[in-house]
Amino acid sequence: MLTPSPQTLTALAPAVREAARRAGDLALSYFRAGGQTAAKLWYKGGSSPVTEADIALDTFLKTHLGELLPQAAWLSEETADDPVRLGHSLVWIVDPIDGTRAFASGHPDWAVSIALVRDGKPILGVLHAPVHDRLYEARFGEGAWSNGEKLRLPEAEILSGPARVAGPKPLVDRLEQHINPLERLPKVPSLALRLARVADGSIDIGLVSAHAQDWDIAAADLILQEAGGRLTGLDGTIPVYNKPAPSHDEMIAVASRLHPRAIGAMRA
């Protein structure tokens, strides 16, 4: 089996969902709501936090997902990059804890993010936010769900109230110059959750700083797509995954119906 069929993806989804839940349970054993994590904490590259929980989840998921689909390569925030992935059609792209700073400080907005990518495009995505007991998932061409409830963004071309926007302040400031009224929501520490909340309709426009990595966005990108939304660069291009440098420029996430106006406002 070189390429998963839709039937195979449907059969694979429950096992990936279960892996995400088990990883979430493992992370919760280290999490302390409102306080410092029980996990050992250090910094890589001088400023990026990592905990022993990140490493434990990464090890668990690499083993478990590798057993589910041995022909898929691996790309994760917590594993040294192996360029062998570039020769593979199928790649697991994983962030064991998206939002490590939030996790480490006791903030609830962090998630386990798992995507299966084929030829640069996500075809299966699972995003589990254990503290919220919220699991998002999507399969290419089949839809997106939140805790089993189908997600579908409205198709109206205008909002009934102020645009609810979440993202870095400089980007929100830029948007506000051209879209008003605008309601500033608190920035969601987990980028994956920020995008998923656009998919479930609780955020109208999600903004993304430059240098987001594949593992931050791949699963949530598919969830948003399948819910009727779009994640693109400010030039309108869609993300391509599993490139030699798995990094992206500034992006915007929004319902498809609102994309032309929102991206136009960011370009103005």
Image (tube, rainbow, N blue to C red):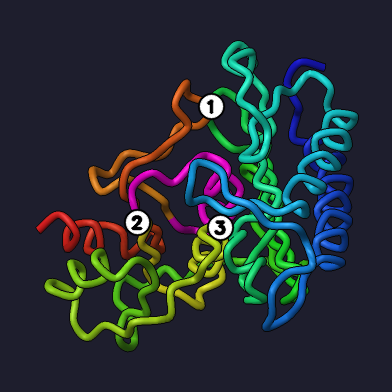
First reached walking from the N terminus: tag 2 or tag 1: 1
Residue 122 makes an appearance in the image: yes
**Residue neighbourhood size for the residue with mark 3, other residues' Cα within 10 Å, grouped as few (<14), some (14–19), many (≥20):** many
Instruction: Give the position of the C terminus as an image quadrant.
Output: bottom left
Point 43% across, 80% down: residue = 186
Q: Position of residue 102 (x, y in %)?
A: 60, 68
Per the rendered image, the range of residues in magenta is 209-229
- In the rendered view, would you say 218 is above or below 201? above
Reading the image, the residue beneath label 2 is 252
Q: Which quadrant is home to the N terminus?
A: top right
**Was residue 227 drawn as part of the magenta stretch in this picture?**
yes
Q: Amino acid at mark 3?
A: Ala
Q: Compare marks 3 and 1 and give the one earlier in the sequence.
A: 3
Q: Residue at x 79, y 68 (%)?
A: 38
What residue do we see at 66% from left, 66% from top?
104
Q: Nearer the viewer, residue 242 or 81?
A: 81
Mark 3 or mark 2: which is in front? 3
Look at the numbered disc 3 and give the secondary structure of its residue: helix
Label the magenta part by its dominant secondary structure: helix
Whole-percent x, y for residue 63 in the image: 87, 33
Residue at position x 29%, y 70% from top?
169
Q: Count neighbours of disc 2 (C-alpha within 10 A) and say few if under 14, some if 14 to 19, many if 20 or more.
A: many
Q: Which residue is mark 1?
A: 242
Q: Nearer the viewer, residue 265 or 132?
A: 132
* Residue 53: x %, y % from top left: 77, 54
Quarter of the rendering containing residue 238: top left
Q: Pointers 3 and 2 in contact (CB under 8 A)?
A: no
Q: Which mark is residue 220?
A: none
Which kind of residue does numbered mark 2 sit on? Ile
How far across and how far down the image is residue 181, in percent? 22, 86
Residue with the mark numbered 3: 192
Q: Give the mark nearer the N terminus: 3 vs 2.
A: 3
